[in-house]
Amino acid sequence: MRKIMFTFLLTLSMIMLINIVPTKAFDNETELDLLIRRIDHINEIYNSNYYILSEEEFINSKITDTLKSYDDYVKHLLNYDLNELENELIVNITVDSETINVNIETYFRSTSGSRTLSFYNGNNKMILKYKYSGSKFDTSYKPGVTVTKVNTKNFFEMSSHTGSFKNSNKTYSIIAKGRVITPSGVVSNKSFTVNFNL
């Protein structure tokens, strides 16, 4: 009789536990669905393509420096007040593509140099390595461009760039394309134009 009673109580406990877990998972899924619907609504209004990272994208992104697991990332998103999140998304979406002009001073007779500048509100740095002759860029050398993040929570991730010589080879213009990664999601199709002037 004790064995039957023990088995009955154990089975009852397991049934209760099974019923509790899916309910909590369902609540999180409902909250996440609500969040995704809000993001879709913002995308519609602002003609943008903001989205929440998939687990694979999260693992491959640099945001893992601040949030250690995908579960932490989802919990972080669910902790946002929806109105606060909406305001943050709008700020990130409406950041215009910047055009930055940088003057390079050539005080030395060297024929090569590098220049570093901050952009995207100081969240990133761009480094240009170049060669020049007098007051013009050396067009036989393709300048190297590197973008690094300064801020680990909100930054631009460059996927590609193009560069061209302009203004009688006195300007090297770079268009950096990529996406902005924030703790609340990703804004893709962002670009920054930087003009380096000799």
Image: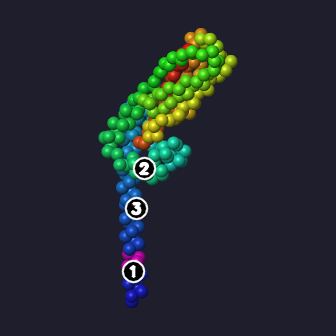
Report crowding for label 3: few under 14, some 14 to 19, many 20 or more residues within 10 A (C-alpha): few
Image point 52% across, 43% down: which residue?
Answer: 61
User: Residue 160 at what x, y percent from top left?
Assistant: 57, 30
Disc with the residue nearer the chain's start (1 vs 3): 1
Residue located farthest toward the front when viewing the structure as drawn: 108
Q: Secondary structure at mark 1?
A: helix
Instruction: Kindly tell me whether residue 68 is visible in this rendering.
Output: yes
Res 74 label: 2
What is the span of residues highlighted in magenta in the rendered image?
Answer: 8-12
Query: Which residue is under mark 1?
Result: 8
- Residue 162 coordinates in the image, percent (x, y): 58, 24
Question: Disc 2 versus disc 3: distance between alpha carbons?
Answer: 17 Å
Marks 1 and 2, how far apart in space? 37 Å
Q: Main secondary structure of the magenta part?
A: helix
- Say above or below: 175 vs 106: below
**What x and y, as percent, mark residue 24?**
37, 59
Q: Considering depth in this image, is 96 or 35 the residue closer to the camera? A: 96
Q: Residues within 10 Å of mark 1 (few under 14, many from 20)?
A: few
